[in-house]
Image: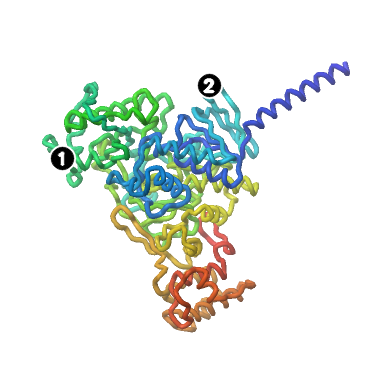
Amino acid sequence: MKNLLQTLCGLFLVVFYSSCMNLGDNRVDVLIVGGGVSGVTSGIQAARMGANTLILEETTWLGGMLTSAGVSAVDGNYRLPAGLWGEFKNRLSDYYGGLDSLKTGWVSNVLFEPSVGNKIFHEMVSAEKNLKVWKQTRLEEVKRVGDEWIAKVNVEGQGMKTVRSKVMIDATELGDVAKMCGVGYDIGMESKNDTHEDIAPEKPNNIVQDITYVAILKDYGKDVTIPEPEGYDPKEFACACANPVCITPKEPDRVWSKEMMITYGKLPNHKYMINWPIEGNDYYINLIEMSPEERGKALEYAKHYTMCFVYFLQHELGYNTLGLADDEYPTEDKLPFIPYHRESRRIHGLVRFNLNHALNPYTQDEKLYRTCIAVGDYPVDHHHTRYHGYEELPNLYFHPIPSYGLPLGTLIPKDVDGLIVAEKSISVSNIINGTTRLQPVVLQIGQAAGALAALAVKNNQKIDEVSVRDVQNAILDAKGYLLPYLDVPVTDVKFASYQRIGSTGILKGEGKNVDWSNQTWLRADTVLLASELDGLFDVYPASKDEWKKTGTEKLSIAEAVQLVRKIAENERLAVTVDPETLWKAYGFQTLDMNRDILRGEMAVLIDQVLDPFNKKQVSITGKYI
């Protein structure tokens, strides 16, 4: 009997050990569900920071809306090449032979073939030794057990596998993982009573933006007109451009010529992105709460609608040499893998970013500008004209805003630990989603999510315990922007100092809207006024009364140095201030202690001597702690 027990115990240990070994093969630090725009960048960033990372992707491509959905015309942030977005843009430039080679259409300064974007994302991912990707993989079930996630995933050709991770990132197109984990969320428009946004509707609704099933066309140099699709009605697209059958356009101020319409999304190598918003192939349907099977059926109608528009271009407008590209998508119908989703679930996060935070960041109760991890410069742009009743909705066509920073707390759900939410499902209002949804912002959202995840793993912290400043420093180390200042490029030695001091509120930027490319400036080259020092005294209140005794309107460099020395003394900082060395190191103009100090010079002086960014920590709402 004793020998039998020993044998059984031995067998149990063998089985147990083997099971652990199998589980160990699928144990990672960070699990990312979705290999789209934010999924790729979160994976790369987490891996670069030392986290063992796995991306799950349902298709065979990487890049989501930029590639798998065919929206290969980047909206905004051309002058803000933040982090991995900048890396991606530079790789495109190298591939095609320079930045000017990306300006093939007029809707964007960065246009490329989706297949090329997919190739580049694969190259970027393959370079990271800590990063793996499982393609054609679907998450079936996930639960939180203790301090880890246990996910059951279905890998095509391999069956079910179990993955365990410390942190999980929802990088899906519609926020499906957040729902599976029990995160609270909203769909549709909030009322202005909820968000206090002037242009929000009076009453909430569940209306989402139109989706688009993009088509990538190629010039074959011969007639490739498709058969007329069943149910085709040219009236649906009559006012897509100026032509004899356009009588009552929905948007009278935006009736372009057919040449302008077709070159809107012109891509390199004689290809055309058909993602036309003016009575084109936008399509209204709310897929968010549908099952995967229901979504698949509904999207067949969206695909059909796009093919009707392709036929309209070929048959009615004479573009009969343009047909679906046969060298882009390895799909049976030559259409993209997924539609372009402009809207998804929006989680209830630790903070909620709205239009007012972008318009007037410094007057809000929450000082979210101190916590930013990404930047955007595109107007608020909503697509609703394919919704029946769109006339009653707010007019959100390119609503002007300044460029803005996006706060970290939008990525962190309120009530679920160990989860970070990326892509378009972050905690923002419906209105401001019209700009945070755009590709360069979502690329940065992913990068911040990866940094946050890696820090939580490295420091053995809960997600909401990770220091805001630690995440921001990781972004700065990766050549990312916290605030969208245009004063100096990311390669300038002064860049990080400007970003840090702006993120303390000691010196505040000035935003303005300029056409499609909105701007914010620190005004680094202008003379600093004494009235602009309120932000300094918010951080160092003990120095306020002493400074007021001077009664001057401007500060000489000598006075500024003396003020900073006094603050350092009050803060008991063992530092020395050597203006000559500092001015030389940062490339400022010749030092004259008697002239008025410039804002940029003051920013560097404060940053390098007092280091308030790192020594004065902030909460997730921007409050000093």
The image quarter in which residue 262 lies:
top left
Spot occupied by residue 543 in the image (x, y as percentages of width and height): 54, 76
* Mark identifier at residue 242: 1
Spot occupied by residue 540 in the image (x, y as percentages of width and height): 54, 71
The answer to whether residue 510 is above or below residue 71 is below
Quarter of the image where the N terminus is located:
top right
Looking at marks 1 and 2 on the same chain, the residue that comes earlier in the sequence is marked by 2
Judged from this view, the residue extending furthest toward the left is: 244
Q: Is residue 256 visible?
A: yes
* Mark identifier at residue 157: 2
Q: Is residue 309 visible?
A: no
Q: Residue at x 47, y 69 (%)?
A: 587
CA distance separating discs 1 and 2: 50 Å
Quarter of the image where the C terminus is located:
bottom right
Q: Amino acid at mark 2?
A: Gly
The answer to whether residue 529 is above or below residue 419 is below
* Mark identifier at residue 616: none
Judged from this view, the residue extending furthest toward the front is: 97
The answer to whether residue 366 is above or below residue 113 is below
Q: For this rendering, which residue is in front, 343 or 230?
A: 230
Give the crowd class for mark 1: few <14, some 14-19, many >=20 residues within 10 Å. Answer: some
Give the crowd class for mark 2: few <14, some 14-19, many >=20 residues within 10 Å. Answer: few
Spot occupied by residue 119 in the image (x, y as percentages of width and height): 44, 36
The image quarter in which residue 238 lies:
top left
Judged from this view, the residue extending furthest toward the right is: 2
Q: For this rendering, which residue is in front, 147 or 613?
A: 613
Spot occupied by residue 366 in the image (x, y as percentages of width and height): 47, 58
SS state under label 1 = loop
Q: For this rendering, which residue is in front, 287 or 188?
A: 287
Q: For this rendering, which residue is in front, 521 or 581?
A: 581
SS state under label 2 = loop
